[in-house]
Amino acid sequence: MNFFHVHIGLRTFKTGLTVMLVMLVYHFIDRPAFVPALASVFALRENWDNTIAFAKVRVISNVVGGGLAIIYYFIREYTHDADWVSIILVPLLIMLGIIIHNKLDQSVGIVGGMAAFLMIALTIPMGATIDYVLLRVLDVFVGVLFAIVVNRFAMPDEIKKVEAAAEKVEADVKKAVHKIDPKHHQD
């Protein structure tokens, strides 16, 4: 599809579609769509196999980042939201997260895992319950799931088959019109 002579590829379209679906669902359940929309953008890749491979990385990195956010939450609660907790504990937990990812041989998930941790830990409102943290972790899984589903059903091979079938129908229609009216010329 060309829009003002700019190529909009299938991955671009699928990313926009995924974000739209996430926002639509989250609108109806009256929850913020930021976390799952961002997770879906991270997870969606150029094809099915890469999306599945990257989704696995996102799930592992989300478990690590979400687990660290839960640890952060409990320590913050235990210390009654002391200012030093964020200043000291967040960098320590970042280092721990990097170590865990490396030990799991998942260094490709470090950025995503630490982004999930920071996104969750640094947005926990004062007085929030553990539900807040758990829902943010779940939101990332939801975003990844949306990316997987959209990429599964908007596969380039399937779309190419539909396009080829449409071109064949168009050619057949042109032939039929030409048989009916041989003088009729179409571009």
Image: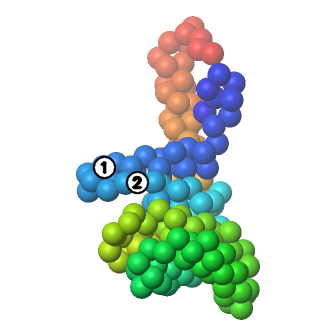
Quadrant of the rendered image containing residue 26: bottom left
Front-most of residues 184 and 22: 22
> What's the mark number on residue 111?
none
* Disc 2: CA contacts within 10 A as few (<14), some (14-19) or many (>=20): some
Quarter occupied by the N terminus = top right
Quadrant of the rendered image containing residue 125: bottom left
Q: Residue at x 65, y 22 (%)?
A: 4
Front-most of residues 159 and 111: 111
Q: Residue at x 63, y 29 (%)?
A: 2
Q: Which residue is mark 2?
A: 33
Image check: 25 left or right of 48?
left
Q: Amino acid at mark 1?
A: His
Does 69 sit above or below residue 183? below
User: Are the residues at dot 2 and dot 1 in contact (C-beta closer than 8 Å)?
Assistant: yes
Q: Residue furthest top?
A: 183
Q: Residue furthest bottom?
A: 103
Q: Which residue is mark 1?
A: 27
Give the SS element for disc 2. loop
Which is nearer the N-term, disc 2 or disc 1?
1
Does 164 sit above or below residue 30? above
Q: Residue 62 at what x, y percent from top left?
A: 54, 75
Q: Residue at x 71, y 91 (%)?
A: 103
Disc 2/disc 1 C-alpha distance (Å):
8 Å
Residue 54 at least partly seen = no
Q: Residue 93 at what x, y percent from top left?
A: 62, 81
Give the SS element for disc 1. helix
Protein image colouring? rainbow
Q: Residue 183 at what x, y percent from top left?
A: 57, 8
Label count reads 2
* Disc 1: CA contacts within 10 A as few (<14), some (14-19) or many (>=20): few
Q: Amino acid at mark 2?
A: Ala
